[in-house]
Amino acid sequence: MRDTLAGPRQLIKQLHAVMAAPLEAQERLDRIVRIIADNMVAEVSSLYILREDGILELYATHGLNPSAVHRAGLRVGQGLVGRVAKTAQPLNITNPRSHPGFAYLPETGEDEYNTFLGVPVLRAGRMLGVLTVQNRAPKRYDNEEVEALQTTAMVIAEIAGTGDLEKIPQSTAALDISRQLHVAGVSLVEGVGLGRAVLHEPRVVVTRLLNDDVEHELNRLETALDKIRGNLVAHLSRDEVKGDGAPRDVLEAFLMIAQDRGWARKMADVVRSGLTAEAAVERVQSDNRARLLRSTDRLVRERLHDLDDLANRLLRELMGRSPTSLAQITGDAIIVARSMGAAELLDYERTRIRGLVMEEGTPASHVTLIARALGIPTIGQAAGVTSMVESGEAIIIDADGGDVHIRPSPDVENVFAEKVRFRARKQAQYRRLRHLPATTRDGQDVTLSMNAGMLADMPHLKESGAAGVGLFRTEVLFMVAPSLPRMQAQEQLYRQIYKGAEGRPVTFRSLDIGGDKILPYLRKVEEENPAMGWRAVRLGLDRPGLLRTQIRAFLLAAAGQELKLMFPMVTTVAEYNAARALVDRERRFLHTHGYTLPESTKLGVMLETPSLLFELEELLQVTDFVSVGTNDLFQFAMAADRSNVRVAGRFDTLSQSFVRMLKRVADACREANVPVTVCGDYASRPLEALCLLGLGYTHLSMPPAAIGPVKAAIRATDLGRLRARLWPRLEPGRGNDDLRHLLSRFADANDIPV
Ligand code: PEP
Ligand code: MG
């Protein structure tokens, strides 16, 4: 027995030869463990592969009882091997039997050994198995040996990537590499999508592993590092990040990581052990990912995202790649991203996108707004999803519930394919309702309009049969623009929207920016509570230049027709009056300068803050119409942040207090003879829409996809009976009544599809 390591380069060379040889998969693994044992002067070398059922099955061994291969196994977390898999860390110990984690497998005969070194086999951060060496003599493996075994594990991970391991008969179920996974996230845009995963800014797959010129590879690594650092420095001098502020902080932190000597040194060390520069980047990043993914600290995980991003930039630099498009797959695509900007989503070819799943993303984030406008089923907060799936693999997202199925079994795939077909049939039914009126059984006409935010939404008017646009969120136009649209550009956009509406009424909303709706080209103001901060009409009144420009563009675009414009987040009547005064001023200006004005101008208020409920009578004397923004009104009424998943679903939207609030608004508007609409998401849910109907609302605005289901419910409802059931339950003293239950029972009993 030799007592020195022959050197990692020699080991890698031999492994390389075995990989290239025309061998059966099992024979290749047997040779590999033998070479490892020889080179590492170990009596035992074994490879365990993680199966679908969480068992680490012994796949090959040199030194242990050969009859235990495919017969012995441990659970993740069980024994020393299981511990390596669980922690994704090397374990290097002497006298393993005295270790608290030791679990003896009698069939292997391993009780004679006094040293143990195990390393995880990781591919892109995913656990594939464990590689071990053992010796009888009670020695401790040195760092060089640990490194060598880790490098070997990476070669084995490559074999797994080729599918070679799958050719080996398994003792039972499929292997980890083809393992079906389920990830739970949060539904952001409802729907179901099946397709092939496309990793947004995907990891680059390293194909060349072993180097034959260390100096050359070290140079390549250094040059690539210099290049990405240089790019970041250049980025820092761009106009939008000049001065202080969040973008600059983020970039500086990023640059600091890129300049971190420890990171560069680790990669250089791996290159010296025989890997190419790109393989070294991936090796070090695999370790980082496995280590940091276990952290529950958000900041630590954020750092992982930075490291991932940097590693990707480095890999792309080294391998001359550009970020991926849908071109890498054929057919339907599900985009899998850590996070994504709204404009980035628009870069993809819409017709092939069947879904979007992100590790981040909240209901109110920009990308969600865009995905909703485009009707793309979307799931957010799917932890670790980018590390679990490779581009091109099958993936299903069930955004009704928030479930992601990676590499689904045929059974699961069939169930979801059926669900998609069912939805399509339903949509076809709704399409048939398109030209029928939204009238209750007892003759109450209801106007159903749609919400929009982009020019691309306008064709939905015809497809959905909407009466018009009840809410046009103009900030979405601004969010997807590369820079602040000037007056003429805005006028042009609004004209196009009128054109797209083909004579149907459009209600524009002035810019609702601030809060989490950030325009990339405007400086972001850091606020403790942005939803209650300097946003919407508050910002518009404090920075009247922005609001006046927008108002002028509206007035010009609506020349000769009706302009309907409302202001978001109005909190006092005085604010509304101030906004109205800006419109009057612009009208006077345009009139004096000979421009054609709109034929009529109707100005409205979005009722989104509870304070306005206590100034309703005064408000209704000055406003032309009211539109209830239930998304914000609910969050402020319940003090529950709409984008915080912990509390957003905590209170029932059909709770007595909120329903009474909505009734008060409906009653006051009716008495004052002021038109009122509901344009928050409330109106898009059939049961809530029934409730609104019962309260007296006859104009609802919602995403186009909701119009069919809501219309179907309205057409099946007898409004008189509904009111007879609902109203007595809203009387004082009935505070504990469960209105959701009441309305569901009513719908069931009357065959109303909700
Ligand atoms: C609302 O708050 O209900 C609303 C329609 O506005 P947004 O969702 O754009 O804040
Ligand atoms: Mg709102």
Image (cartoon, rainbow, N blue to C red):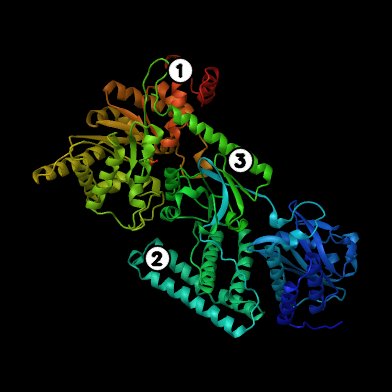
Towards the viewer: 399 or 20: 20
Provide the residue designation for mark 3: 416
Compare marks 3 and 1 and give the one earlier in the sequence: 3
Query: Mark 2: which secondary structure?
Result: helix
Q: Badge 2 is on which residue?
A: 248
Q: Is residue 53 above or below residue 418?
A: below
321, above or below 579, in the image: below
Vertical placement of residue 684 versus 169, above or below: above
Q: Amino acid at mark 1?
A: Leu
Q: Are marks 3 and 1 in contact (CB under 8 Å)?
A: no
The picture places residue 555, in percent across and down from the top left corner, at: 20, 42
Dot 2 amino acid type: Arg
Q: Is residue 364 left or right of residue 519?
A: right
| Image coordinates for residue 429, horizontal then vertical, percent | 49, 29
- Residue drawn at point x = 21 percent, y = 40 percent: 558
Total residue callouts = 3
- In the rendered structure, which amino acid carries the disc numbered 3? Phe
Foreground mark, 3 or 2, reads 3
Q: Is mark 1 within 8 Å of ligand 1?
A: no
Say which residue label 1 marks: 722
- Give the mark toward the camera: 3 or 1: 3
From the top left corner, tell me how far across and down residue 319 is, in percent.
Answer: 54, 72
Q: Please give the name of the residue rendered at 47% of the width and 28% of the height, measured from the top-left corner.
A: 686
